[in-house]
Amino acid sequence: MIPAGYMAKRVVERPDWLHAEGVSTIYSVSSHVSKDFADYINFWKHNGYWLFDSPKTIVDIALENDIDLADTALFFYEVHEQQFDGRQWVRFDSTPSFCTDVQVPKAMVLEGYDVVTFVCQTSPECSPLSCNGLASEVGTNSRCLLQSFEQARSLLEHGAFDHGEPGPYRVFAVYSVAWPGDLSPRARTGH
């Protein structure tokens, strides 16, 4: 797995239309259900994996653009070095025109694994487990994530994602991370 970067998200509870009773909250990489802190691509400060190298970059964007981070959770992601094109695993690279220098957090909690579509080969597009409701058909944890990379690989190779959004598909490890003390949204707002 390759360190891919950070994202601040507004995590939501399982929507009623997602019939996966074991799911309580959505920790998907895509922003279709649990939204990113902003339409961040417009700021052009993301890295070659279309995430952020550090929490500080997210905070800087928020401060410069009057974006409230108080209700966000911070996530760190690793991505498998190959993507699945529906038939085989093939190597992919980060976008070389963006500098990528990911600062790996000192402490992080593995929440699970997400499968994400990358038709345009840029930013995360769809997380079929939540976006297409596949969590109701395959076993996920309470965060709407798979338990292991091996489970994700097996589901992909055996066609479980064939009737969701089109691939290629990338597998991400999803980690929850505490906001660093000096960057904490609560510390900056006094709440």
Image (cartoon, grey):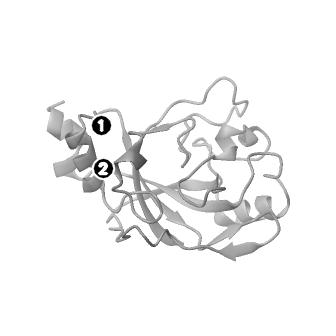
SS for tag 2? helix
Q: Quadrant of residue 53?
A: bottom left
Q: Is residue 172 left or right of residue 11?
A: right
Q: Is residue 177 left or right of residue 12?
A: left
Q: Quadrant of the C terminus?
A: top left
| Mark 1: secondary structure | loop
Say what amino acid the circle numbered 2 marks. Ile
Q: Position of residue 176 (x, y in %)?
A: 43, 51
Q: Nearer the viewer, residue 39 or 37?
A: 39
Q: Residue at x 80, y 42 (%)?
A: 137
Frontmost residue, 20 versus 47: 47
Q: Residue at x 60, y 48 (%)?
A: 125
Q: Is residue 72 left or right of residue 33?
A: left
Q: Position of residue 41 (x, y in %)?
A: 42, 49
Location of residue 114 by image quarter: bottom right
The N terminus sits in image quarter = bottom right
Viewer-side residue, 96 vs 67: 96
The type of residue carrying mark 1 is: Leu
Q: Are marks 1 and 2 in contact (CB under 8 Å)?
A: yes
Q: Residue at x 54, y 49 (%)?
A: 29
- The extreme top residue here reads 16
The image quadrant of residue 184 is top left
Please tell me whether residue 187 is drawn above or below residue 120 in the rendered image: above
Picture disc at residue 69: 1
Can you give x and y, in whole percent of width and height, for residue 77 in the image? 47, 60
Task: In the rendered structure, find residue 58 and report the number of the disc placed on it.
Answer: 2
Which residue is pictured at 28% across the width and 33% down the height? Answer: 68
* Disc on res. 168: none
